[in-house]
């Protein structure tokens, strides 16, 4: 497939690498349009692209930006992008990083808000895997305890295509429902960055508590930032799993 990725950080960059390895035709854009972008694209094995071009002549566009950067994208970025092009949102809202966004603080599902900012439907995916999980946690299809990724959205066919991309990256996929339902794998929920297999992920999505999730999210950030040493990846996964229990 032809894939355009906006954002080449921890998540966008890792998705780009995985998609290149799987044989897709990948182009990437970030906030630069010069030497830094060229160097990052070369590192990822992808084609560098200006922001205005990364959305043209592709099958899938993956937005991998901090939430606060989404409304700063050019207003007409998607105006000539055909409706059949799938737009994937990987974002997670963290008020300490992304500023106060009233709609999100009032409980609007984050990717519904993203979709409203873009004026286009989106599929929420790749948000419930840590960058390290995405980089090193993939397995062959059919492997025991293969980690699963949640995919939410209102277009069943688009979700199937994104599930195929997840499989290419080494992960199972669980359909987590409509875009309105996508709060079930936002920060502070049991499905969020806890490295679950398909069955465990389905159970966790069901257990999510909409009122508690933002409180758990903020408590988690407070606890992690008060530590004097940075936890290992495995410690973060355990920490996230315990948040869901406590
Ligand atoms: N890190 C994780 O483990 C993780 C896991 C799941 C989901 N997520 C979510 O995925 C999103 C991306 O996370 P990340 O960790 O990859 O972030 P990151 O490492 O900070 O990378 C952000 C990328 O966005 C680009 N960018 C920022 N503003 C832009 C703009 N206006 N136009 C074009 N590009 C812009 C940056 O460009 P430059 O490179 O030029 O600075 C950078 O490449 C976030 O919403 C995050 O919450 C993260």
Image: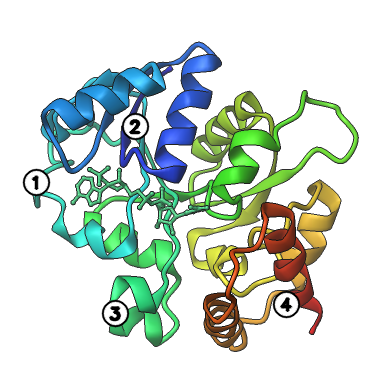
**In the structure shown, which secondary structural element does the residue marked by tag 1 occupy?**
loop
- How far apart marks 4 and 3 lie (CA) works out to 24 Å
**In the structure shown, which secondary structural element does the residue marked by tag 3 occupy?**
loop
Q: Which mark is residue 243?
A: 4
Q: Which mark is residue 76?
A: 1
Identify the image quadrant of the N terminus. top left
- How far apart marks 1 and 4 lie (CA) works out to 40 Å
Which residue is identified by label 2? 84
Horizontally, is 189 left or right of 215 in the view?
A: right
Marks 2 and 4, the one that precedes in the sequence: 2
Picture residue at 81% right of the left edge, 47% below the top: 197
Foreground pick, 194 / 123 = 194
Between circles 4 and 3, the one closer to the viewer is 4
Percent position of residue 31, x then y: 18, 43
Callout 4: few (<14), some (14-19), or many (20+) C-alpha neighbours within 10 Å? some
- Quadrant in the rendering for residue 51: top left
Callout 2: few (<14), some (14-19), or many (20+) C-alpha neighbours within 10 Å? few
Say whether mark 2 is within 8 Å of ligand 1. no
């Amino acid at each position: 497939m032809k894939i355009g990725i906006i954002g080449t950080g921890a998540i966008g960059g890792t998705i780009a690498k995985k998609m290149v390895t799987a044989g897709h035709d990948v182009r990437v854009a970030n906030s630069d349009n010069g030497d830094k972008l060229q160097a990052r694209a070369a590192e990822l094995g992808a084609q560098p692209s200006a922001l205005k071009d990364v959305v043209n002549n592709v099958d899938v566009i993956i937005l991998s930006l901090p939430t606060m950067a989404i409304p700063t994208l050019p207003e007409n970025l998607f105006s000539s992008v055909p409706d059949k092009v799938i737009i994937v949102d990987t974002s997670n809202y963290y008020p300490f990083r992304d500023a106060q966004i009233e709609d999100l603080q009032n409980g609007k599902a984050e990717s519904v808000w993203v979709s409203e900012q873009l004026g286009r439907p989106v599929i929420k995916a790749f948000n419930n895997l840590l960058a390290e999980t995405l980089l090193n946690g993939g397995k062959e299809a059919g492997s025991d305890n293969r980690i699963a990724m949640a995919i939410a959205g209102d277009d069943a066919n688009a979700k199937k295509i994104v599930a195929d991309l997840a499989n290419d990256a080494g992960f199972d996929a669980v359909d987590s429902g409509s875009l309105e339902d996508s709060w079930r794998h936002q920060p502070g929920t049991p499905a969020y960055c806890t490295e679950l297999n398909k069955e465990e992920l389905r159970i966790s999505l069901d257990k999510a508590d909409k009122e508690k999730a933002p409180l758990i999210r903020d408590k988690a950030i407070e606890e992690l930032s008060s530590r004097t040493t940075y936890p290992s990846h495995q410690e973060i996964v355990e920490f996230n799993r315990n948040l869901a229990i406590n």
